[in-house]
């Protein structure tokens, strides 16, 4: 009998991520699911339909992720989000940069991949800018600044930074009681607000929003359950197979773009492989591409002029830097991170929204002064 190791489980994890992300790409292309678009619609036009879709997806992700943990199937404390190290300045700076950048770049990391699948050449350039800037923030020039000036500004907590643990430490009662309460009350409030709209009560729109949340839950199950080894026989240590972070992961689309470029550039390096994040990025593009072809909506699209090119390049760089610094994007922190009820994820989400709002005001100013 072949011994199960982290290396032998990695392909299963990668294929699981690809399959889920493929469905994500199809759903997002069909429903026009877009966080930047949701914020723009709400701030600029007062249309909350896409924002309600996003909130419904968050609610389902919270229910599902915490349900898996309460059932003993995964341990969310082993993700990157619930660590005791509360790097508040990184969350704020990274979130603000990412939010501003996604407005300049016509969408967040996930939307960039979806647009690539639909034939948008601008998004190819944005993805390259995201990937290079993200890699520089992980291991290059930007990483030096991040490690020296941002990450050290932190609060080390007595335990994990998730809301149930914080409430248990400050207000008493067992953490599990708070987890059950918060993982029911927060989604109930979000779903109640989301489905007040007749648009969300339409079967296809409501179902697609909830399915996106379930896909994030599926990501936790794939990496945290299917890819988990209590003791890898190769290292004799606990392991999560097929993830770049070495921890359990769900969907996020900034660092994976950087790792995708790294894999392409170092293809002959046998230590490099298709990880959960890389497979997810590929799946998003593939799902969007297949849906665009099937519906005959595939269209080539290029830049309008030099200013349009510059805005998208700057937006991509800001997203690459911000997404790595804040430990995630609108999906990575806004849905995956928030599903763990980590305080840092809520801070980052608020910073992303503030950054996007500032960018919308900047764009209005530019349009008025043109």
Image (cartoon, rainbow, N blue to C red):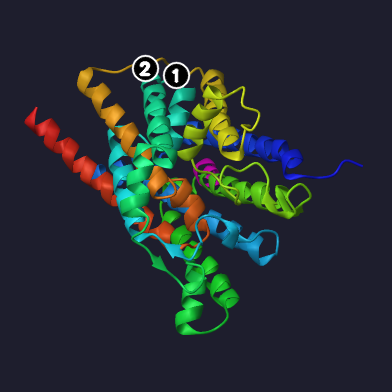
The residue carrying mark 2 is 301
Total of numbered circles in the picture? 2
Q: Determine the secondary structure under disc 1.
A: loop
Q: Which residues, given as a range, are shown in magenta?
A: 203-208
Residue 367 badge: none
Q: Is residue 132 magenta?
A: no
**Residue 131 % position (x, y):** 43, 31
The residue carrying mark 1 is 119
Residue at (45% x, 24% y) in the render: 116
**Separation (CA) of disc 1 from disc 2:** 6 Å
Q: Image quarter for residue 316?
A: top left
Q: Residue furthest bottom?
A: 172
Q: Image quarter for residue 267?
A: top right
Q: Residues within 10 Å of mark 1 (few under 14, many from 20)?
A: many
Q: Determine the secondary structure under disc 2.
A: loop
Residue at (61% x, 32% y) in the render: 272
């Amino acid at each position: 009998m072949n011994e199960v190791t982290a290396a032998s489980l990695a392909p299963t994890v990668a294929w699981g991520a690809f399959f889920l992300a493929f469905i994500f790409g199809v759903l997002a292309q069909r429903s026009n699911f877009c966080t930047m678009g949701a914020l723009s619609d709400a701030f600029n036009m007062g249309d909350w339909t896409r924002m309600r879709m996003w909130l419904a997806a968050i609610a389902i992700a919270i229910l599902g992720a915490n349900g898996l943990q309460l059932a003993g199937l995964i341990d969310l404390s082993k993700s990157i989000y619930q660590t005791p190290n509360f790097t508040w300045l990184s969350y704020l700076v990274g979130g603000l940069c990412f939010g501003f950048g996604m407005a300049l770049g016509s969408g967040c990391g996930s939307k960039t991949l979806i647009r690539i699948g639909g034939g948008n050449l601008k998004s190819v350039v944005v993805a390259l800018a995201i990937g290079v800037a993200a890699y520089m923030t992980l291991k290059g020039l930007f990483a030096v600044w991040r490690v020296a000036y941002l990450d050290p500004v932190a609060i080390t907590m007595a335990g994990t930074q998730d809301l149930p643990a914080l409430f248990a430490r400050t207000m008493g009662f067992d953490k599990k009681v708070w987890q059950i309460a918060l993982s029911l009350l927060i989604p109930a409030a979000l779903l109640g607000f989301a489905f007040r709209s007749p648009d969300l009560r339409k079967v296809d729109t409501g179902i697609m929003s909830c399915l996106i949340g379930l896909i994030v839950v599926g990501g936790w199950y794939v990496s945290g359950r299917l890819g988990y080894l209590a003791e890898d026989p190769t290292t004799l240590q606990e392991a999560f197979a097929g993830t770049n972070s070495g921890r359990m992961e769900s969907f996020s689309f900034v660092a994976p773009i950087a790792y995708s470029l790294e894999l392409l550039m170092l293809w002959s390096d046998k230590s490099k492989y298709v990880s959960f994040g890389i497979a997810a990025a590929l799946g998003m593009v593939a799902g969007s591409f297949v849906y665009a072809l099937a519906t005959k909506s595939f269209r080539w699209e290029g830049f309008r002029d030099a200013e349009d090119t510059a805005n998208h390049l700057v937006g991509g760089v800001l997203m690459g830097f911000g997404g790595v610094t804040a430990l995630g994007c609108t999906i990575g922190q806004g849905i995956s991170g928030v599903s763990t009820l980590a305080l840092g994820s809520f801070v980052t989400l608020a910073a992303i929204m503030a950054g996007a709002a500032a960018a919308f005001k900047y764009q209005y100013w530019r349009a008025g002064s043109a």
